[in-house]
Image: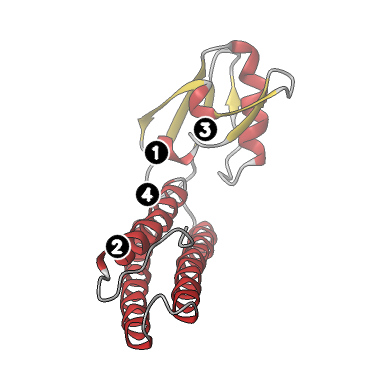
C-alpha cells in the first residue's frame, strides 16, 4: 500500500491521506465486526453476515443473501429463507456461529428467541468485544509499521531528508494515536450498550 507512494520533500498531505484511509478501513472493519455482538435488543446485524454452506455444501453465502431477516420484538429474530431447501443449512450455520442461540424451525422460517442476558453472558460478550478491539489495534499498528518502513526506505534511498523523515514519523504517530483512541471510543460505546 505504501510502496507506490511518492514522497515529496515538505509535502506531508499525500502521505497523511493514504495513512488515514488505511487506518479508517481498520475502524470500519471493527465497527462491522462488533455490529454482530448483541447489545440490549435483537438486531439483524447479529446474524446477517453468518456464512452458510448452502445447496449441499456447494455454495458459501452470507445469510442476508439467502433470507429476509426481521426483528418483530426486542428479543426475537425471524429468518425467512427465500428458498426452503436452504432452511437446514441456515439452521446449521447459526448453531455453529458465535450467536449463542439455538434456532427453532417450523418448516417455513427460523426463530431465534434471545434470552435476557445474564451477567455471565454480558461478560462473555465484553471479552469478545475486547478481542475484536485488540484485532483492530493490531491492524492499525500494522499500517503504522508499513508506513514507517516506507519512510525508512525513502530516507535510505535519499528520496527524503532525515529531518523530513522525522517529521513524517511524528505525523504518523499522531495519526496512529488518533485512530487508536477512536477504536477505544467505539469499543466503550458498544460496551455501554452491552452492560445496559
Image: 194 above or below 69: below
Q: Do labels 2 and 4 touch, CB within 8 Å? A: no
Along the polypeptide, which appears first: circle 4 or circle 3? Answer: 4
Distance Cα–Cα, label 1 vs label 3: 11 Å
Residue assigned mark 1: 43
Distance Cα–Cα, label 1 vs label 2: 39 Å
Along the polypeptide, which appears first: circle 2 or circle 4? Answer: 2
Q: Where is residue 189 in the image (x, y as percent from the top left)?
A: 32, 61
Q: Looking at the image, is mark 2 or mark 4 nearer the viewer?
A: 2
Q: Do labels 1 and 2 touch, CB within 8 Å? A: no
Residue at point 51%, 37% (across, down): 49
Disc 4 on helix, strand or loop?
Answer: loop
Distance Cα–Cα, label 1 vs label 4: 9 Å
Label 2: how many Cα within 10 Å (few below 14, some 14–19, many 20+): few
> 128 or 116: nearer the eye?
128
Residue at point 37%, 80% (across, down): 169
Q: Where is residue 105 in the image (x, y as percent from the top left)?
A: 60, 22
Q: Do labels 1 and 4 touch, CB within 8 Å? A: no
Residue assigned mark 2: 14
Amino acid at each position: 500500500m505504501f510502496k507506490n507512494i511518492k514522497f515529496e520533500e515538505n509535502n506531508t498531505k499525500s502521505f497523511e491521506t493514504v495513512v488515514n484511509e488505511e487506518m479508517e478501513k481498520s475502524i470500519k472493519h471493527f465497527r462491522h465486526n462488533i455490529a454482530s455482538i448483541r447489545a440490549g435488543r435483537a438486531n439483524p446485524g447479529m446474524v446477517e453476515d453468518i456464512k452458510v454452506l448452502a445447496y449441499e455444501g456447494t455454495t458459501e453465502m452470507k445469510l442476508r443473501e439467502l433470507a429476509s431477516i426481521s426483528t418483530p420484538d426486542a428479543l426475537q429474530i425471524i429468518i425467512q429463507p427465500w428458498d426452503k431447501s436452504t432452511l437446514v443449512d441456515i439452521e446449521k450455520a447459526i448453531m455453529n456461529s458465535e450467536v449463542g442461540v439455538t434456532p427453532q424451525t417450523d418448516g417455513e422460517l427460523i426463530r431465534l428467541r434471545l434470552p435476557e442476558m445474564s451477567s455471565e453472558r454480558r461478560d462473555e460478550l465484553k471479552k469478545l468485544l475486547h478481542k475484536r478491539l485488540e484485532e483492530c489495534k493490531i491492524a492499525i499498528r500494522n499500517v503504522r509499521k508499513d508506513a514507517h518502513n516506507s519512510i525508512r526506505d525513502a530516507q535510505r534511498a535519499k528520496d527524503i531528508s532525515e529531518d523530513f523523515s522525522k517529521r513524517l514519523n511524528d505525523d504518523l504517530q499522531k495519526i496512529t494515536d488518533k485512530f487508536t483512541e477512536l477504536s477505544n471510543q467505539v469499543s466503550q460505546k458498544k460496551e455501554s450498550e452491552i452492560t445496559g
